[in-house]
Each structure stands twice: as structure tokens, then as C-alpha cells.
């Protein structure tokens, strides 16, 4: 920054020496201050070193405890849950392939032969992958035995990284709402189902269901769009074999 000087002012011959002395003095003070600060820091560390070491050691212990918990508690529990799930899933698969599978679905839900069912796994192994899959399977089992309220409750609680299973869960909720006479909710869940994950299996399936129930709700323009999308984007799907009649019928209505 420039300093304004008055005209006629005499130059001082002693000023530079004073400035140098002041600078030296100031520098010395800074170093003295640093030395003092360092000494205080050393005194602090010396005085509280046990506390500091304890904090550091405590942090390390927490990390090691977490890793140990994951290795010796969580992992074995997850493995145990999978073993239980296999038996429950076995009953579920038998029910799917049976002409009268209600009793098998209930055994899959409640367990049998000393093994847990889906409901037990959900309760006793919360947070494990097996418990998440059991939640989905429990919802599907309830859907198949006609307990639509429980089907909706369990499927709505299902959440997993597998986007296809999420899509199927949303579609199954739509089926349950359709069965209890709530077409608007069914329509919304069918839409959520085909938007969750696009694939050749579930997308045309739920597009078709959304379109059919959309016609029932008077949403004919949207329904026609869904039917045409099936025909154009999924021509090899079984739903594509059914849309021509629906497209012709809706085009006549418009």
C-alpha cells in the first residue's frame, strides 16, 4: 500500500535503524512465541498422553470390534438364515407345482419338521438377505392362498437390490388390489411395476395388465398406448399375441 508523504518533511537518519531493531525484536518475539507454543503442546501431550492414546486405541478397537462382529456374528447368522430359507422355499416350490397347494403355502409360511417358515425367518433374522427374500416369498404365498391384505402388507415391505424382484413385487400388489376390488390402486401398482425395471418378461406383462384395467377405469387413450407399446417393443411376448384385438376395439371407440 502506498504511503502519502508531506512536502518539506525532513528525512530521519535514525529511522531505518529503529525499523531494523523493531523488525528484529518482532521476529524474536514470534520465534519466542512459537517456542512457547511448542513447549505448551509438548506439555499438553505429555500430560494427556494416556488420554490421547486411549482415544486412538478406542477408535481402533471400535473398527476391530465392527469387523469381528461382521465376521463372527453377522456372517454366521446370515448363513444360518439361508439354511432355514431353503426349507421354507422348498415347500413354496412344491405348492407352486401342486394342484392344491394351499396347505403347502401355509407350511412355507409357518414352517414344519422343526424348520422355520418365512414368517419365522423374517422375525428372527431381520436385516439379512434371507429375511428380505422371505418377505417377498411370504407376500407371494399369501397372494396364492387368497389372503390379499397380508399379501399387500408383506410385498409392500419388500425392498431389495434386485430390480426384477422389486418389479414383480409391485405387480403382485397390483394383482392383490385387483382381487379386492380396488382397480385404481391396482392400475397404479401395475404402472410402477413396468417402470421399475424394463425387461422382456415383466414389462409386457404389466403393461398389458395396466392397459386392461385402464380400460375399465376409462383411461382408454393411455391403455391404447400401452397395447401399442407391447406390439412394437415386445413383439415376441405372449402378451403381444393378444393386443391386436384390443387395439382394434379401442381405435373404434376413439
Image (tube, rainbow, N blue to C red):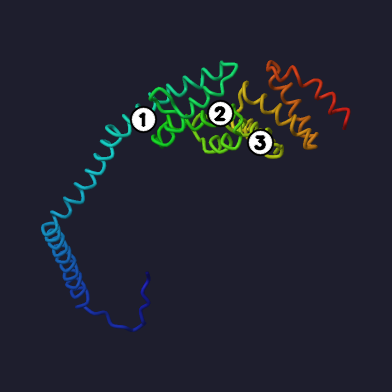
The residue positioned 18% from the left and 74% from the top of the image is 17
Query: Which quadrant of the figure contains the N terminus?
Result: bottom left
- Disc 2 to disc 3: CB gap under 8 Å: no
Disc number for residue 78: 1
Question: Element under label 3?
Answer: helix
Q: Is residue 151 above or below residue 93?
A: below
- Disc 1 to disc 3: CB gap under 8 Å: no
Q: CA distance from mark 1 to mark 3?
A: 33 Å
Q: CA distance from mark 2 to mark 1?
A: 22 Å
Where is residue 19, by image quadrant?
bottom left
Q: Residues within 10 Å of mark 1 (few under 14, many from 20)?
A: some
Disc number for residue 140: 2
Which residue is label 3 attached to? 177
- Disc 2 to disc 1: CB gap under 8 Å: no
Q: In terms of sequence position, does the residue under pointer 2 or pointer 3 come before the other?
A: 2
Q: Position of residue 84 (x, y in %)?
A: 39, 25
The residue positioned 17% from the left and 51% from the top of the image is 54
Q: Is residue 239 above or below residue 225?
A: above
Where is residue 64, by image quadrant?
top left
Say which of 53 and 112 sits in front. Answer: 112
Q: Residues within 10 Å of mark 2 (few under 14, many from 20)?
A: many
Say which of 66 and 41 sits in front. Answer: 66
The residue positioned 26% from the left and 41% from the top of the image is 63
Say which of 42 and 139 sits in front. Answer: 139
Disc number for residue 31: none
The residue positioned 61% from the left and 24% from the top of the image is 199
Q: Is residue 234 above or below residue 1?
A: above
> Is 172 left or right of 77, judged from the image as shown?
right
Q: Is residue 248 above or below residue 28?
A: above
Amino acid at each position: 500500500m502506498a504511503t502519502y508523504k508531506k512536502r518539506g518533511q525532513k528525512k530521519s537518519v535514525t529511522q531505518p535503524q529503529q525499523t531494523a531493531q523493531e523488525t528484529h525484536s518482532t521476529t524474536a518475539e514470534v520465534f519466542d512465541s512459537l517456542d512457547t507454543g511448542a513447549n505448551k503442546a509438548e506439555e499438553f501431550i505429555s500430560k494427556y498422553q494416556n488420554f490421547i492414546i486411549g482415544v486412538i486405541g478406542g477408535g481402533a478397537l471400535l473398527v476391530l470390534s465392527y469387523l469381528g462382529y461382521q465376521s463372527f456374528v453377522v456372517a454366521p447368522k446370515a448363513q444360518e438364515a439361508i439354511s432355514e430359507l431353503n426349507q421354507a422355499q422348498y415347500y413354496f416350490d412344491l405348492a407352486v407345482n401342486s394342484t392344491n397347494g394351499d396347505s403347502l403355502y401355509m407350511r412355507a409360511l409357518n414352517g414344519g419338521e422343526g424348520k422355520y417358515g418365512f414368517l419365522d425367518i423374517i422375525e428372527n433374522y431381520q436385516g439379512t438377505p434371507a429375511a428380505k427374500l422371505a418377505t417377498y416369498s411370504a407376500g407371494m404365498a399369501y397372494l396364492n392362498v387368497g389372503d390379499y391384505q397380508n399379501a399387500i402388507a408383506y410385498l409392500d415391505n419388500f425392498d431389495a437390490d434386485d430390480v426384477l424382484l422389486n418389479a414383480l413385487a409391485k405387480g403382485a400388489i397390483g394383482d392383490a388390489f385387483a382381487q379386492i376390488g380396488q382397480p385404481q390402486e391396482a392400475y397404479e401398482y401395475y404402472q410402477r411395476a413396468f417402470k421399475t425395471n424394463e425387461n422382456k418378461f415383466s414389462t409386457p406383462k404389466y403393461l398389458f395388465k395396466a392397459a386392461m384395467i385402464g380400460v375399465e377405469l376409462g383411461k382408454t387413450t393411455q391403455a391404447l398406448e400401452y397395447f401399442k407399446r407391447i406390439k412394437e417393443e415386445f413383439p415376441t411376448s405372449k402378451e403381444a399375441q393378444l393386443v391386436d384385438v384390443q387395439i382394434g376395439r379401442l381405435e373404434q371407440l376413439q
